[in-house]
Image (cartoon, grey):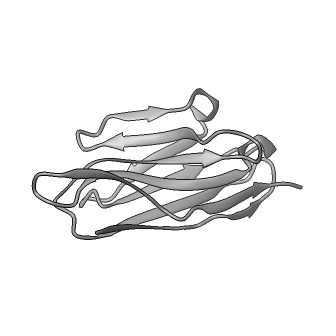
């Protein structure tokens, strides 16, 4: 089985920065893609950013130019650098991974979520 462990959430002031980290552990044969989603109160979960194993990156329009997703050399850890935060970025942020946990089968995995609050 695969586990995704997030860290780095917390409170930031408007205009501030936070960095989220996510590490995948367990039985990992290959990572197809990893990324971040967020869910604000009363709203649906939405994609923030993701990076695939070829290095292709997608960002939500609302975070382009402010957030940067990156990964480590193994591809099993992913990071989200969030700059120029606004109150609209307040949400629970979830790490997401599409990962081969056997040599032939991939599944979608989720972290437990980490709260990001942007407030003065």
Identity of the residue drawn at 28% across and 69% down: 1
| Label tally | 0
Residue 8: where, in percent of width, then height? 59, 67
Residue drawn at (58%, 27%) of the image: 61
The residue closer to the viewer here, 15 or 26, is 26
Residue 86 picture location, percent across and down: 77, 43
Spot the residue most to the right. Answer: 120
Horizontal and vertical percent for residue 12? 76, 59
Q: Is residue 83 above or below residue 27?
A: above
Query: In the image, 54: left or right of 119?
Result: left
| Quadrant housing residue 52 | top left
Q: Can you say which quadrant of the picture contains the C terminus?
A: bottom right
As drawn, the residue found furthest toward the top would be: 61
Residue name at image x 29 percent, y 52 percent: 107
Q: Is residue 46 toward the left or the right of residue 13 in the image?
A: left
The foreground one among 71 and 2 is 2
Q: Position of residue 75 (x, y in %)?
A: 27, 56
Q: Residue at x 50, y 48 (%)?
A: 36
Q: Residue furthest left?
A: 103
């Amino acid at each position: 089985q695969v586990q995704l462990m997030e860290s780095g959430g917390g409170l930031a002031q408007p205009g501030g920065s936070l960095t989220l980290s996510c590490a995948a552990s367990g039985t990992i044969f290959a990572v197809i893609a990893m990324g971040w989603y967020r869910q604000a109160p009363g709203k649906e979960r939405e994609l923030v950013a993701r990076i695939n194993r070829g290095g292709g990156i997608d960002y939500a329009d609302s975070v382009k130019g402010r957030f940067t997703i990156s990964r480590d050399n193994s591809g099993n850890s992913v990071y989200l650098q969030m700059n120029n935060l606004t109150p609209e970025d307040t949400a629970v942020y979830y790490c997401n991974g599409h990962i081969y946990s056997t040599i032939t089968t991939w599944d979608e995995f989720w972290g437990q979520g980490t709260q990001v609050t942007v407030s003065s």
